[in-house]
């Protein structure tokens, strides 16, 4: 899911290693950042940037890759993040059976 992010960081000149990428993926999978873009930003920055000279380049790439993930709040003041459709589809593929996906589509939802 974050391979494009990793590759763009490298192409921007950040010396990001595969180990740093795997650390980011593992930390994200454990829920360290929750569903807050700001927390994910600091998590990914701490995992991928080892020299402050690279902060500006990291910020540019992060903004480019994750643009549009702006937090909104529901009526209870809880942040709502608009996740890209591709992320949601991949999540559904990992956690739902084909029967559950067919049931969602039958109810008018979309999994493709």
Image: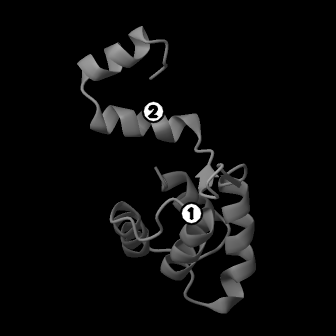
**From this viewpoint, is residue 71 visible?**
yes
Residue to which mark 2 is pinned: 89
Mark 2: secondary structure: helix
The x, y position of residue 6, in whole percent, is 53, 62
Task: Indicate left or right for 5 with 67 as reference.
Answer: left
Task: Indicate left or right for 27 with 5 as reference.
Answer: left
Check the image and report above or below for 17 versus 101.
below
Residue that appears at 62% across and 60% down: 8
Identify the residue at the far bottom of this view.
52
Check the image and report above or below for 29 versus 42.
above
Q: Which one is in front, 53 or 46?
A: 46
The x, y position of residue 18, in whole percent, is 40, 69
Instruction: Name which quarter of the figure residue 96 lies in.
Output: top left
In primary-sequence order, the first of circles 1 and 2 is 1
Task: Indicate left or right for 108 with 65 as reference.
Answer: left
Check the image and report above or below for 86 versus 65.
above
Q: CA distance from mark 1 to mark 2?
A: 19 Å
The x, y position of residue 76, in whole percent, is 61, 54
Mark 1 vs mark 2: give the one in front: 1
Q: Which one is in front, 43 or 76?
A: 76
Mark 1: secondary structure: loop
Residue that appears at 34% across and 21% down: 101
Residue to which mark 1 is pinned: 36
């Amino acid at each position: 899911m974050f391979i494009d992010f990793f590759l763009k960081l490298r192409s921007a000149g950040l010396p990001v290693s595969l180990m740093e990428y795997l650390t980011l993926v593992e930390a994200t999978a454990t829920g360290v950042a929750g569903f807050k873009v700001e927390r994910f930003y600091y998590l990914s920055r701490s995992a991928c940037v080892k020299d402050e000279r690279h902060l500006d380049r990291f910020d540019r790439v992060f903004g480019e890759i994750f643009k549009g993930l702006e937090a909104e709040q529901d009526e209870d003041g809880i942040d709502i993040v608009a996740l890209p459709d591709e992320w949601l589809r991949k999540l559904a593929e990992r956690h739902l059976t084909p029967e559950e996906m067919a049931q969602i589509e039958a109810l008018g939802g979309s999994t493709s």
